[in-house]
Image: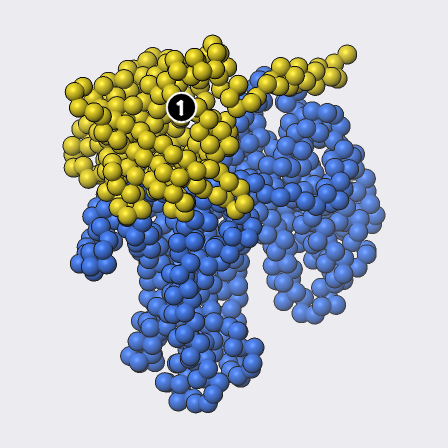
Chain colours: A blue, B yellow
Amino acid sequence: MKNFKSLQLLDVFKGLFEKADIDYSTMRRILQVKLTMDGRRTSTVMSQNMGKSKSDSNQFLKSLWFYAFIGLTLVPILFFGENYMFQVSLVLGVFMFLIMTTMISDFSSVLLDVRDQTILGTRPITSKTISASKAVHVTIYLFFVTAAIISIPLIIGTIRHGVLFGLLLVFTILLSNLFIVAITAMLYYLILKFFGGERLRDMINYVQIGLSITIVLGYQVVARAFEFVDLEATFTPEWWTLFLPPVWFSAQFAIVLNGEAGIYYYVLTALALLVPILSFVAYMKILPAYEENLVKLMDQTTKVSKRGRFDLFKRIASFVTRSKEEHAFYHFAEKMLKNERELKLKIYPSLGFAMIFPFVFLYNNYTAAGSFEALGSGRSYLSIYAALMMIPGVVIMLQYSSKSKGAWIYHVSPVTDLTNSIKGTLKALIVRLFLPVYIAVSVIYLVIFGVRILPDLLIVLLVTLTYSAICFKIIKGTLPFSEPFESWSQSDGWKTLPFALLIPVFGLIHFGATLIPFGVWIYLAVTLVVTPLIWKYGLKRSPSS
Amino acid sequence: MDKKPDRVLSLKGLTKRYGDKLVLDDIDLDVYEGQIIGYIGPNGAGKSTTVKIMLGLEATYAGEVEIFGENIKQNNVDYKYRIGYVPEMADLYDNLSAREYLSFTGELYGMDAEQAETKARALMGIFDLEEVFDSRISSYSKGMKQKVLLISSLLHDPDLLFLDEPINGLDANSVMIFKEILAKLSEQGKTIFYSSHIMEVVEKISSRILLLNEGKIVADGSFGELRQQNKEGSLEEIFNQLTGFKEYKDLSEEFVQIVQRDKR
């Protein structure tokens, strides 16, 4: 096991811990083990390009580069002028959002590891030492992420606005970190208390998905943000700003550096100081109760409700499937896509992209066309093909599961024709994941382009069906949900590339069809005939694979 | 043995509630050096709760728990140096290798890292696991994980052992070794608290059997004594009788009927 640098740094504070009656060497040993284990897992930020990593190279440290990049993009904000209320609020807003989501998505495992109960709780270690090691563990990571994000803005900000600005920023960052840790922990506590462990895990899962989407979108937004740099930046005190934590923290900048005065700024500064400290005190108070509630994480029960809606999907299931086996696999895949968190984390972000990318292209066309009318009468609706980009990536994920060992059921059950497993899974994917996204995008497109594009939208839907069947060739003979995520490799990502290149081809054919009279209707007829054939003959799979 | 065996563990009026539910109802119990206690009871009878309280995982309870003569509420850490524990769920940090995990847990008991590692390697060797010493535990089979848990609980030579389904997943040969280990340890005066649902094993290895039902101890004595009192043949039958379970014939019949219902 490595001797971590961060722990060597921690040794400096050894005396402090010992004074607080904490067994330092034990705490250090626990941290060493925890950090080693962390080096062997992937963080959410990097999960989009995870791969086989056998070495102990810390994935987390790599993800810091990403945070540093975000920090870099904050720099232009510092040049908006001298209005600190506006600048600092913006910088802190981004910073706090990132820290909060990272806390939830990546450090939850630290805060919520129930194994600690049996492994550490039963050993001769004081609960004080265990709590301290948890706190230090989170602090180490928070320190790294914070440093990665804020270092560059801090240095440049200090150069531009002076040392006082730098010192205030450091102080503010410390306060906001304190605030976030306390708030996150209390949020967990409340959810655990009122909803139980499964709900908390779900919430964490959705935050992880949200973070993945935000990160990719972030690149898009940041690239465009520079267009608005000359935006007039003014800040007017409004009552609702009292509820925005980043605004609290920026008030002190306004007072000290802009010389602002008045009750509004004093209230904000008071909030900035008091809320973090009070929430941290409250956090310390509930800590014992919190640990006790952690036990709830071990129970897996959730209350099932929502009967009515399920029936609709049951109808659809029987409507789209052709045999009992196919129906069984459809349901199975539906449940896996809905309940398996790791799978969701890999798939749902792509859904978000499928939703957004058509509009990114549409926006480009809009800038080219110049006016909304010109856009509406053109052929830009073909940008909806961008939504298909999710399909190869999602299809390739269908072969994985974190509980892949359950796949023995395929081999012991007397399923004669595995074609059904593929058809069922694929149908579930399209009906439950793609269709909702596609319908949502279509409705917006119908508003923009008018009802005239209805046949085109139908064509795209049929092409999607064909395309997803073709994409299933990527995973060759592998059965759905039968491989562990660890066997995912970088080359899997490359395999999807030729299939992704098919999308513009489909788009071009469609474009060609719009050029000839009645071309769209002819093309619609062709796809209506071809699609069922592809599904019938293209997905055949020998029973012995 | 000439001297009277020492009392290792003592529960006085131990009561535990979860909300309105009474899990442990005023339990009194004294356990002496060298005893192998077979701790049995139906699911939800309160077995693991008792063990959790004794291990200090549950801090809220009424009554007194003394281990090695000291109230665990007053001295809540030091007694754990002399305790070994095998949890029912194979809870361990499986991202670590056996070498890393065992030397870590050894050190938590105040052992020297190198000494812990050497000992662990030797013990792994006995269970024929030396070649996977450096592989991650996540790649182990159920039985292999169980062996790591057993080694981890014994590495520091504890005086009191809490074992929860310890032979889960072990093959017959390993079970044989393990049973023999328990017998040897008890000869030396170590005390073993053994919870399990496998009645045959409990019947064979225990010197004293405790049957817990609905939070109360309903039987306490050696297997021979229990047999005399209850006029039943096996521990399984005694278990059924004392927990008031008689409808197993009806239930099994119903089960089979449901299975065959839709067959033509």
Three-letter amino acid code at disc 1?
Asp
Which quadrant: the N terminus of chain A? top left
| Up-down relation of residue A136 to residue B232 (above or below) | below
Residue B181 on image: x %, y %: 27, 18
Where's residue A93, x and y in %? 47, 69
Where is residue B4 shown, x and y percent of the image? Answer: 21, 25
Please give left or right for residue A160 compared with residue B211 in the image: left
Residue A251 left/right relative to B20 = left
Of residues B230 and A340, the one drawn nearer to the viewer in this rendering? B230
A243, A207: nearer the viewer: A243
Residue shown at 33%/52% (left/top)? A131
Find disc 1 in the rendering and name its residue.
B220
- Outermost residue toward the front in this view: B229
Vertical comparison of B2 with A489: above or below: above
Dot 1, how many residues are within 10 Å of its Cα: few (below 14), some (14-19), or many (20+)? Answer: some
- Image position of A406 (left or right of A520): left
Q: Chain of mark 1?
A: B
Q: Is residue A32 visible?
A: no
The image position of residue B134, as x and y in percent, is: 27, 29
Q: Nearer the viewer, residue A436 or B168?
A: B168
- Residue B186 visible in rendering: yes
Residue drawn at (48%, 41%) of the image:
A298
Asked which secondary structure carries label 1, the reply is strand
Where, quadrant-wise, is the C terminus of chain A in this rendering?
A: top right
- Quadrant of residue A376 within the rendered picture: bottom right
Q: Please name whichever residue, B125 or B31, is drawn nearer the observer in this view of the structure.
A: B31
Q: Which residue is found at the position 18% from the left and 37% from the top?
A: B111
Quarter of the image for residue A339 reads top right
Which residue does the image show at 41% across and 69% down from the upper left?
Answer: A278
The quadrant holding residue B178 is: top left
Relative to residue A222, is residue A471 depicted above or below?
Answer: above
